[in-house]
Image: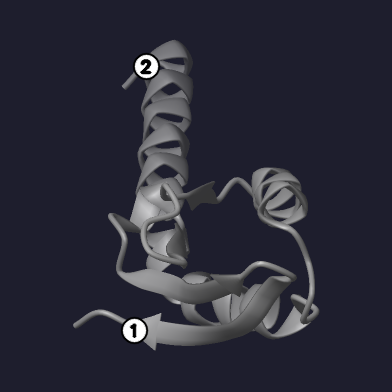
Amino acid sequence: MSPRRKRIGVVLGLLLLAGLGWVVWPFMAGPDQMQSFCSSLAVGTSLEQVQAQAAQHGYRVSSLIEGRAFVHEPRSFGRFTCDLRFESNGLVSSVYLLND
């Protein structure tokens, strides 16, 4: 086998491993990261502030419906979520949920 083909094989193998890691990582680190984010939200925080904090972490916030919204990590397809409850004075509670 020529050195060039060997190098190409090594590069492709590394790219394959990196791609696999990129796909699997949200499922390994997601629960702890979302739980930490959810517990860091202070009572009284506005929806806009929660959206800004979620955007910094790459999370998405659902629309506010009847005082409830959800924060989720898009790469995990919503498996790890934070259930938010709002009232007129801001955030009332944030609870981490694992959707099995």
Q: Which residue of the protein is positioned furthest toward the left in this rendering?
A: 100
**Image quadrant for the C terminus?**
bottom left
Q: Residue at x 65, y 53 (%)?
A: 54
Numbered disc 1: secondary structure? strand
Seen from the viewer's position, the closer of residues 64 and 21 is 64
Residue 66 quadrant: bottom left
- Taking the image as shown, residue 34 lies to the left or right of residue 44, namely left
Q: Nearer the viewer, mark 1 or mark 2?
A: 1
Give how far across and how far down residue 8 sits, in percent. Answer: 42, 19
Whole-percent x and y of residue 48? Answer: 71, 46
Residue at the spot 77% in from the left edge and 81% down from the top edge: 43
Q: Which of 17 and 27 lies nearest the eye of the viewer? A: 27
The N terminus lies in quadrant? top left
Q: Which mark is residue 5?
A: 2
Count of labels shown? 2
Say whether residue 8 is left or right of residue 61: left
Q: Residue at x 48, y 80 (%)?
A: 31
Q: Residue at x 45, y 53 (%)?
A: 64
Quarter of the image for residue 99 reads bottom left
Sooner in the amino-acid sequence: mark 1 or mark 2 = 2
Q: Depth check: give the residue in front, 15 or 60.
A: 60
Residue matched to label 1:
98
Q: Is residue 90 above or below residue 12?
A: below
Residue 28 vertical placement versus 65 (above, below): below
Q: Residues within 10 Å of mark 2 (few under 14, many from 20)?
A: few
Q: Position of residue 85 (x, y in %)?
A: 52, 76
Dot 1 and dot 2 residues touching (CB under 8 Å)? no
Query: Toward the viewer: 66 or 16?
Result: 66
